[in-house]
Image (cartoon, rainbow, N blue to C red):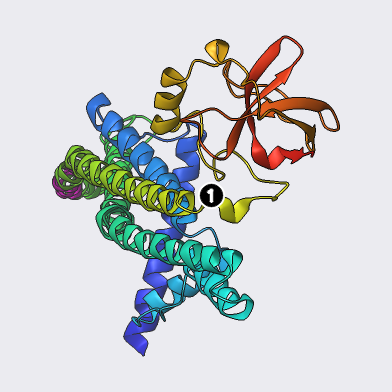
Amino acid sequence: MDFNVKKLASDAGIFFTRAIQFTGEKFGQVEKTELDAHFENLLSRADSTKNWTEKIFRQTEVLLQPNPSSRIEEFLYEKLDRTVPSRPNNEELLGHYMQDAAKDFGPGTPYGSTLIKVGDCERRLGSVQREFLQTSAISFLTPLRNFLEGDWRTISKERRLLENRRLDLDSCKARLKKAKLAESKAAAVPDFQETRPRNYVLSASASALWSEEVDKAEHELRVAQTEFDRQAEVTRLLLEGISSTHVNHLRCLHEFVEAQTAYYKQCHLHMQDLQKELDRFPNAFAGNPGHSMASGGSSPLDPASAVETDTLKIEEVQAPATGTRKAKVLYDYDAADTSELSLLADELITVYTVPGMDSDWLVGERGNQKGKVPVTYLELLS
């Protein structure tokens, strides 16, 4: 207990001494050993790397897990060295709800069967997302975290030691300077007329004492300089390792981009497959006011539609002698291209069909205007 108290008192004394010395440096009152320009650049680069790595790490966490409560839960489980409980993500949960709703509405109905297909697609999307999150956490987040919690802490520790060694070195320089000044004063020749012989002895004794003090201060300075140089070299090697950190993070960034590319590609393929499945049953959507071309048959972006438009020249189509009908427009419709006819709700147009046209479309005429119109936007009149 006595040893601990003495050590605590000694550490407190060193702390206050260094605090006074550091304050004096800030005000330019004491000497300060400056690091070379290359070393300062290394320090600046390290600080910049740490700050930006921390920001990228935090924002990537938000990207992969937008829910702050879930992030806190994952952090606590990680600190407790326990596995995070597996829970369905939002896509998987939505897929479950859709499939449960389909069972309630009837899987044989158009709505129920579509809910089953979409729900199954959402569950596959959720599985793809789960794999993407795991891959990104391992290949990108973990290396960034290892740098912040491992390498950077080591660098910070050695930088603090270097700062302490610098303060010790400057303190030794100040003591040596003070001892030399006192020695020069003690060695000054006394005035023979006003100084008694006894003062010669005192002066010589003081001069010898200060000479010993100078030797001691020079020895301490050499030791402090050696420790400072050694610590500076250790810190320099760690700071130069930041370049290797950049190379490692660059590789991790490439892996993160590859994971994102694979994730979005798989999501796109799943959605394309779902779209093809839904397009096999266009009549299931007949009479739906909100039906769009993307889910009701052919689309101007669909390759099959492009072939149909190239094959069927609307401007060359002639109305048949029989088979034309009047139709009332139920909803406004904006033509997607020049082969289609824009519609206004409640207007009357003449419609007819031609061989080779999709059953979800008719040719509509209004005066001199002609173009394809979707059947679901019309009420055919007798």
Residue 151 visible from this viewpoint: no
Instruction: Relative to 157, say whether 109 is above or below.
Output: below
Residue 122's x, y, as percent?
46, 62
Residue situated furthest front in the rendering: 322
Query: Magenta part of the protein: which range?
Result: 218-231
Residue 165 falls left or right of residue 100: left
Q: In which quarter of the image is residue 331?
A: top right
Which residue is more in the foreground, 264 or 256? 264
Q: In which quarter of the image is the C terminus?
A: top right
User: Image quarter for residue 349?
Assistant: top right
The x and y percentages for residue 57 are: 40, 51
Q: Which residue is drawn at 57% across and 40% down?
A: 360
Residue occupied by mark 1? 282
Residue 373: horizontal and vertical position, in percent? 65, 29
Residue 226, percent across and down? 13, 46
In the picture, measured across the screen, residue 154 lies left or right of residue 122, that is left
